[in-house]
Amino acid sequence: MLIYKIFRADEWALLQAEGASDGAPTDVADGFVHFSTAEQASETAAKHFTAVDGLTLLACDGNAMGDDLKWEVSRGGALFPHLYRQIRMSDVLWSRPLPFDGQTHLFPEEMA
């Protein structure tokens, strides 16, 4: 199952340079890396990245993360994937720019 992580440019650059990352500041504060399903990603972008451009969307294989990935109740009572270890470059299946068109973030077609 594909799960998705949205990173700001500096967070994505750090993951690429270091090969692993604790995630965004909110991930570090919460003690896990926040992910979204395809159905949750646009709401995540709207809620946490309002009007932010220069984002990157990462697609990862949740099944390959094994027991480090937990599905926990979050926003609106929905289950969200939370990774209880660093995100690694080896977790990333693909990455795509996540542009902001002035009203919404434009997600890639392969998410549909």
Image (cartoon, helix red, strand yellow):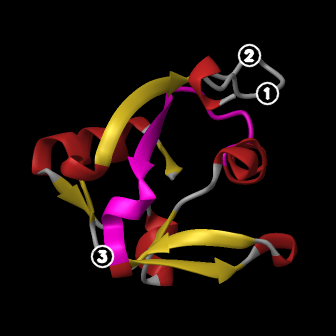
N-term mark: 1 or 3:
3
Left-right relation of 95 to 14 = right
Q: Please state which amino acid type lies under the numbered disc 3.
A: Arg
**Residue for point 33% across, 66% down:** 65
Q: Position of residue 19 (x, y in %)?
A: 14, 50
**Residue for point 65% across, 26% down:** 107
Of 25 and 66, which appears nearest the observer? Answer: 66
Q: Please state which amino acid type lies under the numbered disc 2.
A: Asp
Real-space Cα separation, disc 2 to disc 1, in angstroms: 6 Å
- Labelled disc at residue 85: 3
N-term mark: 2 or 3:
3
Which numbered disc, 1 or 3, marks the residue closer to the eye?
3
Q: Position of residue 99 (x, y in %)?
A: 60, 21
Q: Residues within 10 Å of mark 1 (few under 14, many from 20)?
A: some
Secondary element at image label 3: loop
State whether residue 99 is above or below residue 20.
above
